[in-house]
């Protein structure tokens, strides 16, 4: 490639992720590796982060991720969540526990305790101001797969 | 010497405004979710009004469909019994409160096809205060095989959230009716999972009964009991049909009793 073209390409700002799912890509990726269905992933995103997303959206996102992985292979592979680089990227569970100073069990206990405290204070009925039901009228209604059909 | 301590302690504080008559009384506003025209909102409200009347319960009828034609509107069927109200004013739906305070404890409001924004704004600004007065809300969404009717219900739900309880009426506008967009889409499923609406069925009605009834403003009850002077609705088969529709509709409404009474 001509050096002036390369210079232009280098000067371009990094592409901003277009998907709302991007911040959760690691979680989605990991859940998928653990054989979780798109529906389950969608439910976790909804329940844990209040992110309403369709099954097909999750599927498309993962496909796009896989595609981009193939494209970028050898370039910035270290940023992607793969089986090979997972340890380097996020470390083992034990390493992370040591870094955080707490074990997973302790964390779970603290989290449960916080939950009950909040519950006692009555602050759990509306954890955020985020609406419970979100609907985007711009999106067409998505037909659910019929019973017996695989969703993934 | 002692005097009224509250006055001395808070001389500048205004006495709270009294809204006593409604404070301990529970009341209910039942409103249709507008949005899509021609789905059968008024037809269901008519049946509901007849059910309340048959059960000797006093109701206030409000026809908020100001853009609707006269024929087929709630006012057309109930003449003076239904008050036609223009909601496109700064006061929005404030008349709910006024009517509940002065009249029956159940208010049926037939919303117009373009009443969404006014209703959302009113709920955003007034809901908490009105709820504190003991008023609860039931939203009736009508779905048909047309996906637009489902989208309309979901749009309303996204704005009203859990401030209302939901009844969804599956109105079979065609025969057979396919409610695939309501029963089998992701967005509708999510709405059902979150708000657990009560789903009622409204049978397909023969055009030879429905059209003249709409044209002359005759309710099913009047047709069933032959309390009208429209010849074309006097046929024995239509009278029987009207009786059957009404009976089945009443059976469905009975299931939703807990969402309809104060």
Image (spheres, coloured by chain):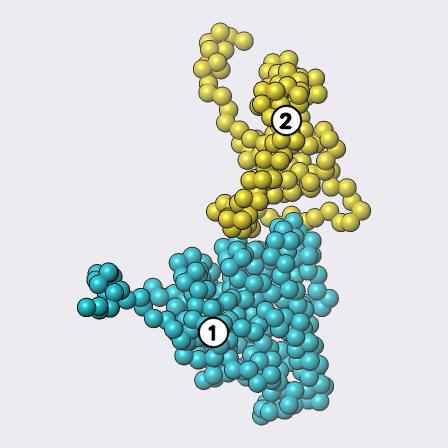
Chain colours: A yellow, B cyan
Which residue of the protein is positioned furthest toward the right in this rendering? A148
Query: Looking at the image, which is closer to me, B245 or B134?
Result: B134
Report in which chain the residue with disc 2 lies: A
| B171 lies above or below A1 | below
Kindly identify the residue that appears in the image at 61 percent across and 43 percent down.
Answer: A47
Q: Which mark is residue B168?
A: none
Residue pushed farthest top? Answer: A3
Secondary structure, mark 1, is: loop
Q: Residue at x 50, y 11 (%)?
A: A6
Residue that mark 1 sits on: B25
Specify the quadrant that holds the C terminus of chain A. top right
Residue B108 drawn above or below residue A128: below
Task: Find residue B166 and report its image quarter.
Answer: bottom right
Q: Residues within 10 Å of mark 2 (few under 14, many from 20)?
A: some
Determine which residue is flagged by label 2.
A103
Q: Is residue B190 left or right of residue A10?
A: right
Query: Which residue is more in the foreground, B2 or B182?
Result: B2
Identify the chain of the residue marked 1, using the numbered disc in the image.
B
Left or right: where B164 falls relative to B221: left
Picture quadrant of residue B229: bottom right
Q: CA distance from mark 1 to mark 2?
A: 53 Å
Rendering coords of residue B146 (x, y %): 62, 60
Find residue B91 and report its image quarter: bottom left
In the depicted structure, whether residue B82 falls above or below residue B175: below
């Amino acid at each position: 490639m001509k050096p002036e073209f390369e210079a232009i390409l280098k000067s371009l700002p990094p592409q901003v992720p277009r998907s709302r799912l991007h911040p959760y890509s690691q979680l989605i990726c990991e859940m998928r590796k653990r054989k979780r269905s798109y529906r389950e992933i969608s439910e976790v995103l909804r329940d844990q982060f209040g992110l309403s997303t369709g099954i097909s959206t999750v599927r498309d996102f993962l496909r796009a991720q896989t595609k981009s992985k193939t494209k970028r292979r050898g370039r910035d592979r270290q940023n992607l969540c793969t089986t090979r680089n997972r340890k380097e990227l996020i470390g083992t569970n034990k390493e992370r526990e040591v870094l955080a100073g707490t074990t997973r069990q302790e964390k779970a206990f603290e989290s449960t305790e916080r939950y009950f405290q909040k519950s006692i204070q009555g602050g759990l009925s509306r954890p955020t101001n985020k609406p419970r039901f979100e609907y985007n009228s711009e999106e067409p209604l998505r037909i659910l797969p019929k019973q017996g059909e695989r969703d993934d | 010497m002692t005097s009224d301590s509250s006055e001395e302690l808070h001389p500048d504080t205004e006495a709270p405004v009294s809204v006593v008559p409604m404070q301990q009384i529970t009341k209910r506003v039942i409103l249709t979710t507008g949005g899509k025209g021609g789905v059968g909102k008024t037809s269901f409200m008519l049946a509901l009004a007849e059910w309340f009347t048959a059960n000797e319960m006093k109701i206030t009828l409000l026809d908020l469909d100001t853009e609707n034609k006269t024929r087929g509107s709630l006012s057309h069927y109930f003449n003076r019994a239904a008050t036609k109200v223009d909601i496109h004013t700064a006061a929005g739906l404030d008349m709910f409160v006024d009517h509940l305070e002065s009249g029956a404890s159940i208010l049926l409001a037939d919303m117009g096809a373009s009443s969404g924004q006014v209703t959302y704004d009113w709920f955003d600004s007034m809901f908490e205060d009105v709820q504190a007065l003991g008023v609860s809300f039931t939203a009736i969404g009508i779905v048909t095989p047309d996906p637009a009717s489902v989208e309309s219900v979901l749009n309303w739900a996204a704005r009203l959230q859990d401030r209302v309880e939901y009844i969804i009426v599956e109105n079979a506008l065609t025969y057979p009716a396919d409610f695939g967009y309501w029963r089998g889409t992701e967005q509708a499923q999510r709405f059902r999972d979150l708000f657990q609406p009560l789903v009622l069925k409204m049978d397909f009605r023969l055009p030879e009964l429905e059209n003249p009834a709409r044209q002359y403003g005759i309710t099913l009850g009047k047709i069933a009991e032959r309390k009208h002077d429209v010849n074309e609705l006097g046929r024995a088969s239509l009278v029987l049909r009207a009786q059957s529709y009404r009976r089945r509709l009443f059976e469905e409404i009975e299931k939703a009793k807990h969402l309809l009474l104060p």
